[in-house]
Image: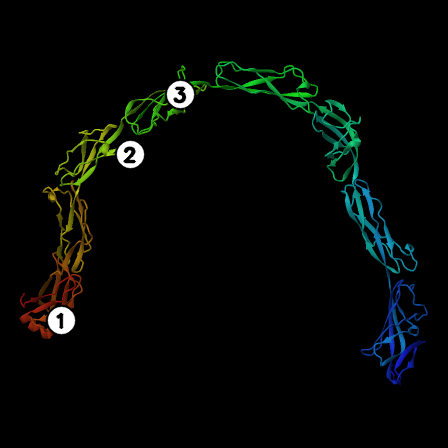
Amino acid sequence: MNIPQSVAPIATLLAVGGLVAATPSPAHAVTSVTVKVTGVQTYGGSPVFTGTTGVAGVTATGMTCTSLSDGTPIAPTVAALGTYTIDGATCSGGVLSKPDYAIAGYTGLKLTVNRAALTVAADNKTKSFGDPNPPLTSTTTGFVNGEDASVLTGAPNLFTSVTTSTAPGDYAIGITKGGLTAANYTFTLVPGTMSVRQSPVSVSVTGAQSYGAAPVFTATTNVAGVTATGVSCTRLSDGRDIAPTLPVGTAYAIDPASCSGAVLSNPSLEVGSYQSVKFSVAKAALTVTADDASRSFGAANPALGYTVTGFQNGEDGSVLTGSPNLSTIATTSSDVGSYQITTNKGSLTSPNYSFILVPGTLTVVPKPVTVTVSGTQTYGGAPDFVGTTGTAGVTASGVSCTALADGTAIAPTLPVAADYAIDPASCSGATLSSTNYAVDGYAAKSFAVAKATLTVTATDTSRTYGFANPPLGYTFSGFQNGDDASDVSGAPALATSAVVRSNVGTFPITISGGTLSAADYKFVLVPGTMTVLKKQIVVKADPATRAYGETNPAFTATYTGFRNGDTSAVFTGTPAFSTTATATSDPGSYPVTIAQGPLDAQNYSFIGFASGSSTLTVTQAAAKLTTTRMNAGVLSATVTYGTANNPVVGSTITFTVGSGTTVACTAVTDVNGKATCTAPNLTRTPILLGGYTAHFDGTAGVAAGEKHQGPLL
């Protein structure tokens, strides 16, 4: 209940049994309020209180209460059983948010006690690979009020995925609450770690080396399927170092304490110890190589020797006894080539070495010979050389020389002569027929230059039928060294059998030496050909005319260009004519096209076959009118045209009285060209007396016409 009072402003508030006393300050009006208090604490902890005033915007802070409504002190030992009621008379210390209000008293509401949190952690464990898991345990922390695990009932559930075959590493130990309970506590569960360590194994070591070389070690383990690599040892069991100088032997023992470096194939295991099996030193290999040698074809073999390599530890041939056996199948008659020098051990021995025997090669090289050279060439051409060796059965080919004995180069420009001498020093390139010999030098014999061949060819020519032959000519080919016709004197004789009246065809042009001559050439004469070509005849279609409805006439042509008095009588066949005009074509002009067709002649060809080069003129046909005497007032006329008397169909015929212009009647011609009509009664008597006239106005193809019919006929 808020009670306004006129009191001095509050300077100091003192809580006394729930009532507030204030020391007055200068007087002003304040409002009294009652603070409602609630509290919360965790089991084993201190309470926290909050207050409300029921007045909007006025809050209360700083309250403390000391007892519950049943008189129980508010202390850390209050059980976490839910909610309790605060004794408001034990509350004090509140401070309001506005100075215009004063606390008149406190009303206790509820105090909530929450459970405290215990941490239950799975204990970390360690085991070796392959061993069973140790028992899983946990540790609980966070007890309050001096309590311990005796206040707990049940136990947490602990578990892990680790088995005896799990590889080394760290694995989680899981934890759940299981049956664990406590009246005043909740639980925070923390997983642990299972550490799996490598298991130790024993490694047995065997070693071997060749004398003077580095050792190689192999190892086995006492675990099936597990191998060891990378092991090395440095000492024997008698204290000697494992070094390249150890003598050859098979019964050495390794000092296990000097071994290290083994890497196991199963990473879940580790090396626990090393055991010695044995160590052996094998003989080093010396290479005994037969020395290569050479000799000429036909000579005796040289003395055979050998070389030893591969000594260890600074040793040399002084540690050897005996020598190898050397041999070859080559004899004085063996061909040029390579022959094996075979190496056998013979009496060669050494305590720390074995022997690798390498054959050598005896090379038989060709025997030197001198090649004697002679040569010829054609003026302007390349030289051809022949070489001989003086050794029976051995020939030389491919030799070439570049100079004469006087220093002149052997070149295409050398004049024709038979007594040149070759400079042997300029010769090279000889290939001998036997590979058992080699060219050692050249000797000269003779060199000759023969005349070159010059081809004189009658020039092919042509002319048209009926004309005279052109002048006959000739050409040279085959000049050498930039020569031309000025290096030739005289001329050949040329002739042909073709004359002006010779028919079309080819005729030989004969050639003979005439007065031809040249110092460096001989002549080859080649005849030519005179070709007589066809003369062209110009063919033109002649103009033609016919009447409408008639068939086209036979077309003719005019020819120009004959020679030697010839006429069209020399032709075979005739040209082919065509036109677009037909019997029903309207009057007018139509092109006449001419083509060669079967037209031919031995000495002539034909031109002028242009499309539409002439014309066919179609004229109107004359109309033929036939009439009959009037019968019972009926007038009739029939209109035809052409030699076939073709009917004019669909044309109007006008009938007039007598020879005048008075129209009696009109009618249209039928399919037979006949038109009939009945004259009016008024015109019949004049027609009986004077007859009638049939008038035809014509068509595009037929000219107009008329016919008078007399009264009697």
What type is the residue that disc 1 sits on?
Answer: Cys
Q: Are marks 3 and 1 in contact (CB under 8 Å)?
A: no
Look at label 2 and name its amino acid: Gly
Q: Crowding near pointer 3: few (<14 within 10 Å), some, many (20+)?
A: many
Q: Secondary structure at mark 3?
A: strand
Q: Position of residue 713 (x, y in %)?
A: 5, 65
Q: In the image, what residue occupies the spot 86% across and 83% down?
A: 30
- Residue 336 locus on image (x, y percent): 48, 19
- Residue at the disc numbered 3: 442
Tag 2 secondary structure: loop
Please state if 6 lies on the left or on the right of 450 as rendered.
right
N-terminal of the pair, mark 3 or mark 1, is 3
- Give how far apart the Cα atoms at labels 1 and 2 are: 108 Å
Q: In this view of the protein, which residue sits in the foreground, 46 or 279?
A: 279
The amino acid at mark 3 is Tyr
Residue 398 visible in the snapshot: no
- Residue 547, compared with residue 686, is above or below; it is above
Quadrant position of the N terminus in the picture:
bottom right
Q: Residue at x 49, y 15 (%)?
A: 334
Q: Real-space Cα distance between discs 3 and 1?
A: 133 Å
Residue 41 occupies which quadrant of the picture? bottom right
Circle 1: is it few (<14), some (14-19), or many (20+) Cα within 10 Å?
A: some
Q: Which residue is identified by label 2?
A: 482
**Residue 24 x, y percent position in the rendering:** 91, 82
Return the residue at label 1: 665
> Do the CB atoms of the residues marked 1 and 2 lie less than 8 Å apart?
no
